[in-house]
Image: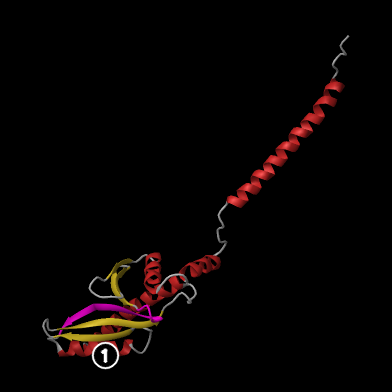
Amino acid sequence: MMEAITIDSLARWFAPCLAAAMGCYWFWKNRSKESDEIDKPVIPSDENQKATIMDNIYSNLNNQQLLERVLKNIGCHINLCVEKDCEFNVTYQGEHFTIVYSEDSSYITIYDIAWYSEELNDIDNFSMVTKAVNLCNQRNTSIVLYTIDKDKNCVNVHTRQCVVFGSFIPKLEDYLRSRFEDSFQQHHNFYRYMELSRKEQFA
């Protein structure tokens, strides 16, 4: 005769099965978590770690590749100059720059060409331009200079800076971005000095 199934006997049979099931679930859950941790890409936790990873990538590039990569990373539109070797035409924040580099040098030259032009008909105005250029060159890394275009009878103002550049520079993207910003600062300085000169002239 079959033994009657009581609540106690059912509990004695069910408890080990439940414990085994819970054990299997716990084992599977932890194995799955470990697998996810292994497969998960390593994401740097802060900006310094990201910069270190980029520095390691940059160290394997030649000067042209390095310059092109950094320019793109800071949002520049670039064209490798077909007519001239080792030269980039660059647009950064709407301003057009020319960058000259060499594979044998740790320096680059950044030109911002003819960002200000003025006719030569007015001697007083030309005097203000030269004065503003001289005052600009008392500050900032960028050198401000002017040239005279006799064909168009005008004076053009430019900015030039020769700076160190290479993968050995920490936070290279921020560094190159600051060089462009220095040129913009000289624009601001020049226009401010021109305005001050006009106020003095008509005071």
Residue 91 shown left or right of residue 141 in the figure = left
Circle 1 sits in a helix, a strand or a loop, which is it? Answer: helix
Quarter of the image for residue 158 reads: bottom left
Report the predominant secondary structure element of the magenta stretch: strand
Q: Where's residue 49, x and y in %?
A: 55, 66
Count numbered badges in the picture.
1
Q: Where's residue 153, x and y in %?
A: 12, 84
Q: Residue at x 72, y 41 (%)?
A: 27
Q: Quadrant of the N terminus?
A: top right
Quarter of the image for residue 4 reads: top right
Can residue 160 be spotted in the picture? yes
**Compared with residue 7, is residue 132 higher up or lower down, i.e. above or below?**
below
- Residue nearest the viewer, comparing 1 with 143: 1
Which residue type carries mark 1?
Lys
Q: Which residues are magenta?
A: 102-119
**Compared with residue 70, is residue 34 higher up or lower down, i.e. above or below?**
above
Residue 170 shown left or right of residue 30 in the figure = left
- Residue nearest the viewer, comparing 164 with 117: 164
Q: Residues within 10 Å of mark 1 (few under 14, many from 20)?
A: some
Q: Residue at x 14, y 87 (%)?
A: 122
Q: Give the residue number, with chain letter if any, for mark 1.
A: 131
Task: Look at the image and name its color scheme.
Answer: secondary structure
Q: Residue at x 78, y 29 (%)?
A: 17
Q: Where's residue 6, x and y in %?
A: 86, 18
Q: Where's residue 28, x and y in %?
A: 68, 40
Can residue 203 be spotted in the picture? no
Quarter of the image for residue 130 reads: bottom left
Residue 77 shown left or right of residue 147 in the figure = right
- Residue nearest the viewer, comparing 31 with 174: 31
Q: Quadrant of the C terminus?
A: bottom left
Q: Is residue 13 magenta?
A: no
